[in-house]
Amino acid sequence: MSELTELTAVRLLDGYRSGAIGPVEATRAALRRAEEIQPEVNAFVRLFAGEALERAAASEERWRRGEPRGLLDGVPVTVKDILLLRGAPTLKGSRTIDPAGRWDEDAPSVARLREHGAVFLGKTTTPEFGWKGVTDSPLSGITRNPHDPTRTAGGSSGGAAAAVALGAGPLALGTDGGGSVRIPAAFCGIFALKPTYGRVPLYPASAFGTLAHVGPMTRDAADAALLMDVIGAPDSRDWSALGPASGSFSDGLAGGVRGLRVAYSPSLGGQVRVDPAVAAAVRRAVERLAGLGAYVEETDPDLTDPVEAFHALWFAGAARVVQHLTRERRELLDPGLLEICGAGARLSAPDYLAAVDVRMDLGRRMGRFHDTYDLLVTPTLPVTAFEAGAEVPQGSGHRRWTGWTPFTYPFNMTQQPAATVPVGTDACGLPIGLQLVAARHRDALVLRAAHALYEAGVTPAGS
């Protein structure tokens, strides 16, 4: 059972094809692992054991007949409890949402998984409405790091990251409005991709607008490419969704990084103070990229920290989330969320549009930057996982989670594809992530470069 939980989705599917393993066996193993980790890590808000085994049995029969339904038939997956999943409440970490309801619709990414025969294990934890970069909520409590339960798993897709890291399903759906798949993936030692905005359709539309993305969280880049081949399809419910991808993301993994022009920015021009262990691990990985044939130059993109503009957009979105709540219902909210909602409600329309102007200029400058460079490489985060239950590291002086995530949220503003790859650990054994960023619509390039790092052994595949 434990060996099954260590397999990637690609390897599980190889086993299904050969008949060496079956979806029921794999699903049982993943469910058992989920139940084992839940008391300490708190990755799930609910598990679907009976339904999962029914779907796995149906998948196993299809494989027996040689008629798999799709690309992920029988593969266990988890869904962040921000996304709709038919038949299960979507409570978004909030006591303000009534679990009684119809719950009769899948989000687009969930619908694609269902069409391809995936097995839904459960829904994973999130901070309330996904508002911050760590995962704790009034509804479901604190989600902890799989490498050290006294530390945070990161957020807002913290439950998804912990589940993948500990073998409770090789694939997870997360959401990312300011780093929310990349932050927990970096803290938990897995891979995650924030795709180009619109590449993975989202419905209902996020209150955080076009900052919000849906992305894969996986054991390695090959699994993420496979998942993108499924969820990166258009859906008419999202008016901003992109058209079909030009080809298979999985087929585009080969080719390596030879000849790519890579800009390495260790601290965004000195704007970010990076922990020495993080800086050293990322630099070693960058040197490996050069060894693989990439042309690496240490240089910085032309940007100043857009945090105030991001706050205006983010806080206004938060205010929009809760504006329908009565005063009594607002008292049920996470106090930090309530605070930023108040700040968002005080913004004027010109304030908001000024933030949009900053965003557009940032996008223009990054577009010009990528006329010269294929990829930008940075640390994913300047720190490793800190104490669980805190929004910011103790003694850091930061007021909000954006203070320690300066490498992630700018690329939600620009809508570029950005991925995190685990590239080592610090002295405490806590994972370190490297971020790969490319121009809009070049998701396949990000996945290809990440895959090259896995293939080169910078981080073990499936780790």
Image (cartoon, helix red, strand yellow):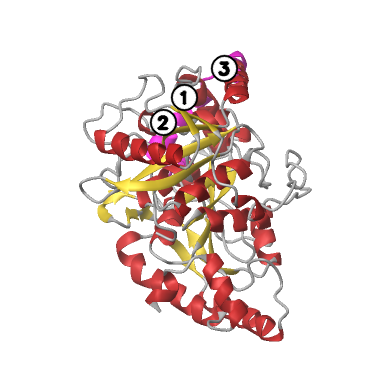
Residue 374: quadrant of the picture: top right
Q: Which mark is residue 343?
A: 1
| Residue bearing the label numbered 3 | 358
Q: Is residue 392 left or right of residue 131?
A: left
Q: Is residue 210 left or right of residue 377?
A: right
Q: Residues within 10 Å of mark 1 (few under 14, many from 20)?
A: some
What's the residue at 73%, 50% (across, down)?
Answer: 247
Expressed as whole percent of the image width and height from the top left, the position of residue 136 reads 37, 48
Residue 221 in view in this figure: yes
Chain-order first, disc 2 or disc 3: 2
Q: CA distance from mark 1 to mark 2?
A: 7 Å
Q: Is residue 174 left or right of residue 202?
A: left
Where disc 2 sits, the SS reads: helix
Expressed as whole percent of the image width and height from the top left, the position of residue 236 reads 79, 48
Q: CA distance from mark 3 to mark 1?
A: 19 Å
What's the residue at 29%, 56% (across, down)?
Answer: 147
Q: Residues within 10 Å of mark 2 (few under 14, many from 20)?
A: some
Where disc 3 sits, the SS reads: helix
For this rendering, which residue is in front, 98 or 367?
A: 367
Q: Is residue 224 left or right of residue 248?
A: left
Q: Mark 1 near mark 2, Cβ–Cβ under 8 Å?
A: yes
Expressed as whole percent of the image width and height from the top left, the position of residue 219 reads 46, 58
Please provide the residue range marked out in magenta. Answer: 328-356
Q: Which mark is residue 339?
A: 2
What's the residue at 73%, 44% (across, down)?
Answer: 238
